[in-house]
Image (cartoon, rainbow, N blue to C red):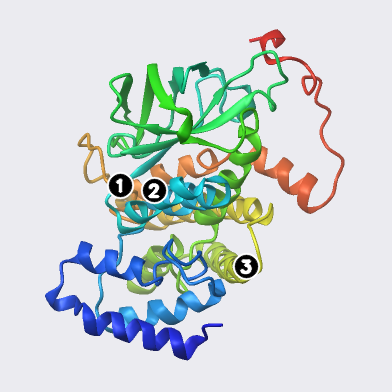
Amino acid sequence: MTDAAELRTLTRELLEAHPPAATEPLDFLKARFDAGLAWVHYPVGLGGLDVPRSLQAVVDAELADAGAPDNDPRRIGIGLGMAAPTVLAYGTEEQKRRFLRPLWVGEEVWCQLFSEPGAGSDLAALGTRAVRDGDDWVVDGQKVWTSSAHLARWAILIARTDPGLPKHRGISYFICDMTDPGVEVRPLRQITGEAEFNEVFLTGVRIPDAHRLGEVGEGWKVAQTTLMNERVSIGGMRIPREGGMIGPVARAWRERPELRTHDLHQRLLTLWVEAEVARLTGERLRQQLVAGQPGPEGSGMKLAFARLNQEISGLEVELLGQDGLLYSDWTMRRPELVDFTGRDAGYRYLRSKGNSIEGGTSEVLLNIVAERVLGLPAEPRNDKDVAWKDLAR
């Protein structure tokens, strides 16, 4: 069993063999992956050493002190937070060895082809079809709200493979090549002026059966692994005290005393405490992850993340008065990463409006928390046993 001392030794050996100042960042990251120091809780040969997840902090601290490059996790967050744990859980050995290393080092960006114009909150109602043709599946349909599709090499995709089954049971899960000629990506310009999101049209896209994750018809089960990890990655990010949205508001309060009022002070204190509670709850959630897979608690964290971001950014705009109404730049961009706290107060206010939609709408997550965390009775569902092809649309 590798312990913290042995991990420090392995990390220092990596640094000696590949000094960060004299090694290309990509070469360093590949060497780190091959040494098992990428995500230490993963299996040997897949970037890990089969040791407890909690020991990752030992490696990260040594590398940070040495000025080693990271893999720019914000740019490849979908791959790291959603695709990788799903491939690890359901992929074949060949799939794991093909996809995990270039994903982690950042050579290949991933996106998520789940939501559709008619299947957002009710994701299981999706209509994108995948029809078997020999060793391939031919996929036709449309996906929407796809972050990083304009940058992605690969996508995690769910599609309907049997319309004669109820909606949750006729779905399969695939890895889609975004360079296929049948994939068309169109930007969706948002209220911020940018186009982080895209809509993706799939026309005769051929996916080898070797790129299927899980059994045919069990895509919903596989997708739950993706979605639970997604909510943890959104709501359970590690941040310092006064990190995230609360930081800029607290700084403005301290630096501009002329803006203060009693009412704003009371609201800021309340939100500061709630932000700190959410941060510490996220720390506890990450400790729970050491013992196993993420559960529905991640949905509660994502709920808190969305509500707090919206309330805090609203307070910031109000605190700044006329300055809060300014907006620096409406230029149409297709950014490589999402900076939730970047730019100015107006950007934060507008961008946070999407937090209660992306990664699962707050209304759906409230049901998940009620049913799976609190044990309340499930909502009546009259379409549970009806074939998808017979559902009203």
Disc 3 versus disc 2: distance between alpha carbons?
32 Å
How far is mark 1 from mark 3, CA to CA? 32 Å
Q: Position of residue 266 (x, y in %)?
A: 57, 66
The spot of residue 40 in percent (x, y) is 47, 71
Circle 3: residue type: Thr
Secondary structure found at label 3: helix
Compute the Cα span from label 2 to label 1.
9 Å
Q: Nearer the viewer, mark 3 or mark 2?
A: 2
How many discs appear?
Answer: 3
Check disc 3 and report the residue beneath it.
281
Binning the other alpha carbons within 10 Å of mark 1 as few (below 14), some (14 to 19) or many (20 upward) gives some
| Among the two numbered marks 2 and 1 on one chain, the one whose residue lies closer to the N terminus | 2
Circles 3 and 2 in contact, beta carbons < 8 Å: no
Residue wearing tag 1: 108
Query: Label 1 near label 2: C-beta < 8 Å?
Result: yes
- The disc label shown at residue 131, or none: none
Q: What residue type is labelled 2?
A: Phe
Upstream in sequence: badge 1 or badge 3: 1
Query: First in sequence: mark 3 or mark 2?
Result: 2
Which three-letter amino acid code belongs to the residue tagged 1? Glu
Q: Is residue 196 visible?
A: yes
Q: Where is residue 3 in the image (x, y as percent from the top left)?
A: 52, 86
Q: In the image shown, does 118 or 309 lie closer to the viewer?
A: 118
Which residue carries the number 2 mark?
99
Question: Would you call the spot at circle 3 few (<14 residues within 10 Å), some (14-19), or many (20 or more)?
Answer: some
* Residue drawn 29% across the image and 79% down it: 14
Element assignment for label 2: helix
